[in-house]
C-alpha cells in the first residue's frame, strides 16, 4: 500500500466544514487531555472511580510508550515533513510520526471503558470519537495510515494491560466486602 497515495486521496476530501470538525476532534486528543478529563470526571463518581483511574493511567502510559519510547527509537518523519507542499490546518505537531500518540491514547482510553463495561451511552460516543480522532490525524496530513493503525493496536494493548488487573482488583474487593 502506498501510504502517501492514501493521504493524497484524503486531501481531495477537504471541505471547510470538514476541516473545522477534524481540527476540533484532533485538538480533543492533544496530549490525551480530553481523555484525562473524562477519566477525572469518572474518578469523581464513586461507582466509576476505578474505571476513571484506569483511563487516566492508560492515557499516560500511551503517551510515554508511544512518543517517549517508540517514537524516539523509530524516528519516522511525518508526512508533512516529507511533502511540505501540503498546507497544514494545524501547527506541525512536535515529535515524530510513528506511532500516532493521538490514536494510541484514544484507543487506550476506549479499551478501558469497554473493559469496565461502561454504559453504552458513554461507550458509543467514545468509540465514535476515538475513530474520528484517529482518522483526523490522516486527514490533517500529520500521520501515515500505519502510524494510526499501530497506535490503535498499541492503545488496545495498553488499555487491556491497565484495565484487566484493575477489574480483578475491583472484583476481589467487591467479593470481600459482601
Image: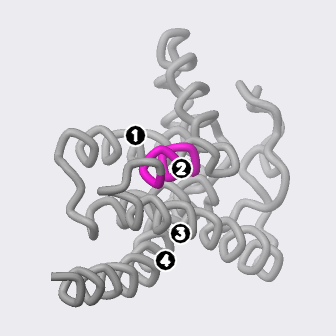
In three-dimensional space, the C-alpha distance between marks 2 and 3, rounded to whole angstroms, equals: 13 Å
Label placed on residue 129: 1
In the picture of the structure, the residue carrying the numbered disc 3 is: 58
In three-dimensional space, the C-alpha distance between marks 4 and 3, rounded to whole angstroms, equals: 6 Å
Element assignment for label 1: helix
Whether residue 170 is visible here, answered yes or no, is yes
| Residue reaching furthest to the front | 178
Disc 4 packing (10 Å; few <14; some 14–19; many ≥20): many
Residue 39 shown in magenta: yes
Where on the picture, by quarter, is residue 84?
Answer: top right
Where on the picture, by quarter, is residue 89?
Answer: top right
Q: Which residue is at 61% across, 26% downward?
A: 23
In three-dimensional space, the C-alpha distance between marks 2 and 4, rounded to whole angstroms, equals: 19 Å
In the picture of the structure, the residue carrying the numbered disc 2 is: 40
Residue extent of the magenta highlight: 36-43
Q: How is the image coloured?
A: one colour
In three-dimensional space, the C-alpha distance between marks 2 and 1, rounded to whole angstroms, equals: 18 Å
The C terminus sits in image quarter = bottom left
Q: Which residue is at 40% across, 40% downward?
A: 129
In the picture of the structure, the residue carrying the numbered disc 4 is: 158
Amino acid at each position: 500500500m502506498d501510504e502517501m497515495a492514501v493521504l493524497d486521496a484524503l486531501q481531495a476530501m477537504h471541505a471547510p466544514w470538514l476541516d473545522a470538525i477534524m481540527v476540533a476532534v484532533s485538538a480533543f486528543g492533544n496530549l490525551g487531555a480530553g481523555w484525562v478529563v473524562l477519566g477525572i470526571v469518572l474518578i469523581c463518581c464513586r461507582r466509576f472511580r476505578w474505571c476513571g483511574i484506569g483511563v487516566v493511567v492508560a492515557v499516560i502510559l500511551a503517551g510515554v510508550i508511544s512518543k517517549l519510547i517508540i517514537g524516539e527509537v523509530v524516528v519516522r518523519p511525518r508526512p508533512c515533513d516529507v511533502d511540505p507542499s501540503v498546507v497544514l490546518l494545524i501547527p506541525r505537531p512536535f515529535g515524530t510520526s510513528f506511532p500516532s500518540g493521538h490514536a494510541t491514547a484514544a484507543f487506550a482510553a476506549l479499551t478501558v471503558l469497554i473493559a469496565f463495561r461502561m454504559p453504552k451511552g458513554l461507550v458509543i460516543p467514545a468509540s465514535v470519537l476515538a475513530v474520528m480522532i484517529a482518522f483526523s490525524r490522516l486527514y490533517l496530513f500529520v500521520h501515515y495510515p500505519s502510524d494510526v493503525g499501530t497506535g490503535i493496536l498499541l492503545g488496545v494493548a495498553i488499555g487491556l494491560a491497565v484495565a484487566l488487573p484493575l477489574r480483578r482488583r475491583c472484583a476481589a474487593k467487591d467479593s470481600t466486602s459482601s
